[in-house]
Image: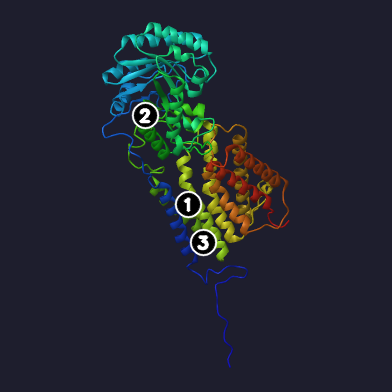
Amino acid sequence: MADIPARKTDREPGGGELGERPGLPLALFAATALAIAGFWAWLGAAVPMPQAAGAGEKLYCVSYAPFRGGQSPLVAGTMISAAQIDEDLAHLATMTNCVRVYSVDFGLDQIAGLAQKHGLKVIQGLWLSSKRDKNREQIEGAVTLANRYPQTIIAVVVGNEVLLRGELSADDVAAAMREVKSRVSVPITYADVWEFWLRNRRLADIADFVTIHILPYWEDEPIAAEHAAAHVDSIRARVAKEFPGKEILIGEVGWPSAGRMREGALPSPSNQARVVQEVLAAAKRGNYHANIIEAFDQPWKRALEGTVGGHWGLFFDAGRTAKFKLGMPVSDHPFWIVQAGGGVLFAMLVFGAALFGGRRNGDMAQWLGVAFCAAAGGALIGWTIENLPLESLGTGGWLRSLVLAATALTAAPLCAVMLMRQTPLPRLSSVLAKPRAEDTLTRGAGALMTVTLAVAIVVALGLAFDPRYKDFPFAPLTGAIVPLLAVSLLVPGEGRRGVAELTGGALLAASAAYIVANEGFANWQSLWFCAALAALAVILVRVRGARD
C-alpha cells in the first residue's frame, strides 16, 4: 500500500493554531465588541427620577455666583460685568423665584438691582472673614443695598460659615449681626453648617430666622445619595426642635455631579438630580424652604475643593445649559453611544496590532489574552477621555492625566504584540540598557511599565497622605495595567527578579491596603483603584525578564 502523505497545516514549530482556526480572531473580536457595547449601554442607561414639583412650579431659591470659566474671586481685581450678571439672571428667572448671593464685592453688588428688573427676590449675603477692614466694607455694602432695594432683598445673611472656618469667634459674629439688624428693615440671619448652630445657640436670639447648611456629601460620615433627602429632613427637624418658634431655612443643600466618592456618597449627574428632587419633595411635604446650591458650576472652587468643588451647579458653566430636567430620566454618560463606538474601534486597533505585528500565528490562550487587552482598553478609553478635563487641574494635574491617558492608549496594542511574539515583560532596568534593534518592543514595554509605576506611586501616595480632594483615576490606570497583567500571566519570564520591581510592588501594596482602610468598603472608586494598584504590584513581583 502506498504511503499516505502527511496532512499539511499552518502550524509553525512552537507556534499557534491560526491556520486551523482562521475564524478565531474574528470571533473573539466580535465577542469583545459586543462586551464593550453592552458595558457602555449599561453605564449610559438613563436613571428614572421622581417628580419633585408640579408643572410650572419654580424653585424657592438657588445660590448664585456669577463667575465663569477662569474668573475667580481668589484673583485680586476680578470684576464681573453687569451684562454677564443680567444674562444669568434672565436665565434663572425662568426656574427660580429667588437667588442667594454671598458677598458685595467683585461686582456682586449689582445683583440686587438687576434681579429687581427680572422679578427675582434676593437673599443678600455679606462675607465675614478674619480681615476686619474687609468686614467693614462688606457690612456697609450690604446695609446700603438692603435699604436701597427693600422690595427685592428679602433678608440679609451676616456671614457664611465663618465659624466653621475658624476665622471669627461667635462674639464677633453676634456683634456684626446686631449692627446690621439695627440698620436694616429686612430680617437678618447667619448661615453655617447645622452643627455650628447647635454649638452657638445664642446667635439664634439675634437672628430673625435660623439658616442651616445640610450637605450630605460633606458630612463627617458621608450620606449616600439614596438616603440624602431623609437625612436632610431629619436634621432640619432636629434643629427646629432645638430652636422652637424660629423659622428654619435650609440655606444650602445640594449634591455634586462629578468628583471623587466619599465612602458611599457618589457624585454623578443622576445622583445630583435625585437628591435635589427628593429634597424639594420633602420640603414641599414638610412646608419648609430649601435653597439649592448652586445655580451654575463654579470652576474656581476646584482650586479649593478638587474636582467635586466645581460641580454643584444645576447648570454647566460652559454654555449655561441645564444638567437635568425635573422629573425626567438622567444618564450619567449621555454620550455613551459615541464612547462605545470609539471603544470598538480601539479594540479593532488592538486586534490589528496582534494580527499584523505579532509575526507568528497564535494559539487560543494568546488570542484570549489579546481579547482581554482589547476589552479592557476599549471599555475604558471612553471613560478615560471623559474624565480627562474633570480630573485635571493646573499644569501638574494635566500632566498626570495626560501621561495616564497615554499609557492607557499605548498598553493594549503594545501588549497584544508582546502576547503574539511571546515576549515577556522586561525588568525596569531594560530602559537604561544599551539599545539593540531587536529590543525595541522590550524597551517600549519597559518604558511603559516605568511610567505607569511612577504615576501610580505619585497618585497612591497622594491618596494616602492628603486624600480629601483627590480623585481616583481608576479608568486610565486600569486601562494601562490590565494588558500588562495579561502578558505577565501568559508569558512568564525566566530571569531574576529585580530590587526596583520588588520595592515598587511592596510600596503599591502597602498604599492600596491603607487607602482601602481609610476610604471604607462602600467607596467603589477606591476599591477599583486599589485593585489596580494591587494588580500592578503582582505584575512587578512576577517580572523576571528574559533569561540572563
Residue 418 falls in which quadrant of the image?
bottom right
Say if residue 104 shows up in the picture: no
> What amino acid is found at the position of numbered circle 1 in the picture?
Gly
Lower sequence index among marks 1 and 2: 2
Q: How is the image coloured?
A: rainbow
What residue lies at 55% left-to-right and 18% top-to-bottom?
Answer: 166
* Residue 505 as seen in the image, left or right of residue 169: right
Q: Which label sits on residue 286? A: 2
Lower sequence index among marks 3 and 2: 2
Q: Position of residue 250 (x, y in %)?
A: 41, 24
> What amino acid is found at the position of numbered circle 2 in the picture?
Gly
Q: Relative to 386, say whether 426 is above or below.
A: below
* Residue 10 as seen in the image, left or right of residue 334: right
Residue 491 falls in which quadrant of the image?
bottom right
Q: Which is in the foreground here, disc 3 or disc 1? A: 1
What residue lies at 53% left-to-right and 68% top-to-bottom?
Answer: 18
Front residue (pair 427, 240):
240
Q: Secondary structure at mark 2?
A: helix
* Residue position for label 1: 378
Q: Which label sits on residue 515? A: none
Q: Relative to 51, say whether 178 is above or below.
A: above
* Residue position for label 3: 355
